[in-house]
Image (cartoon, rainbow, N blue to C red):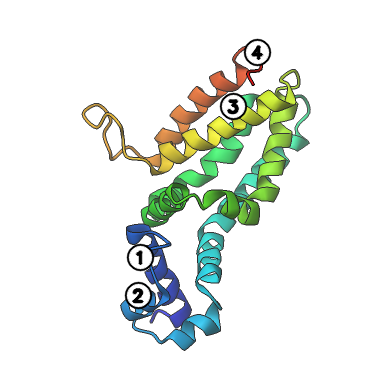
Amino acid sequence: MQDTKQKILDTAEKLFAERGYDATSLRQIIAEAGVNLAAVHYHFGSKEDLLDALVVRRAGPVNQARIALLDRLAADSGRPSVEKVLEAFLLPMSEPADRHPRFVKLMGRLYAEGMMPAITRKHFQSTAVRFLAALRQALPDLPEEELAWRAHFMIGAMAHAMCGAPVFPETLAPATDFRARISRLVVFLSAGFRAPVLQFEETR
């Protein structure tokens, strides 16, 4: 029998994904889960703490896998390729995404609601620091600011590839598995990271 804590987590994941974080109240969650408000406060404390627990449950193992792959790259002699660094960061998402599509939808909701910067600082910062360090090693001649911009663009492309509906549904089958999406994304992003650096005039 499912325990109360997991029942609350599963229900919150479902409602946050369907309605959005802001539009879902704790009372709606407890009504759907069939538990009382005291149970939520006992296990999680607050709605924000509940969301944190949701992210940790799904993203924690992904971050661990990312760090393990980045450690393996760091242990190898020589400079890592951009593709290997991107694969270390992106591929660990594929299997969990296929197994938990509702969480993928939830992350898309959080991105659309503007919550991802705070979520990233809280749950992905240490992994992001390691990833950027590996990218710097793979692209030693790319200026720091340009690397930061391209990583910024990467996050947008990643969010859309994982969470967004196809813009051209008549061409792109919605059933494409996440590993295939990520493999295409790695090819696309590696070309972008290697692209020439343009010189811009400042406008004020």
Q: Earlier in the sequence, mark 4 or mark 2?
A: 2
Viewer-proximal residue among 201 and 9: 201
Viewer-proximal residue among 148 and 133: 148
> Hey, what amino acid is under mark 4?
Glu
> Hey, what amino acid is under mark 3?
Glu
Which quarter of the figure is the N terminus placed in? bottom left
The spot of residue 77 in percent (x, y) is: 78, 28
Between disc 4 and disc 1, the foreground one is: 4
What distance separates the C-alpha of mark 4 from that of mark 1? Answer: 47 Å
Q: Which mark is residue 201?
A: 4
Q: Earlier in the sequence, mark 1 or mark 2?
A: 1
The spot of residue 204 in percent (x, y) is: 64, 21
Kindly state the secondary structure of the residue where label 3 is placed.
helix
Dot 2: within a 10 Å radius of its alpha carbon, few (fewer than 14), some, or many (20 or more) residues?
some
Can residue 130 be seen here? The reply is: yes
What distance separates the C-alpha of mark 3 from that of mark 2? Answer: 44 Å
Query: Residue at point 35% right, 65% down?
Result: 15
Q: Are marks 3 and 2 in contact (CB under 8 Å)?
A: no
The residue indicated by pointer 2 is 28
The residue indicated by pointer 3 is 83
The spot of residue 183 in percent (x, y) is: 46, 31
| Left-right relation of 22 to 203 | left
What distance separates the C-alpha of mark 4 from that of mark 2? Answer: 52 Å
Q: Earlier in the sequence, mark 3 or mark 2?
A: 2
What distance separates the C-alpha of mark 1 from that of mark 2? Answer: 8 Å
Locate residue 176: give its quadrant.
top left
Kindly state the secondary structure of the residue where label 4 is placed.
loop
Between disc 4 and disc 2, the foreground one is: 4
> Hey, what amino acid is under mark 1?
Leu
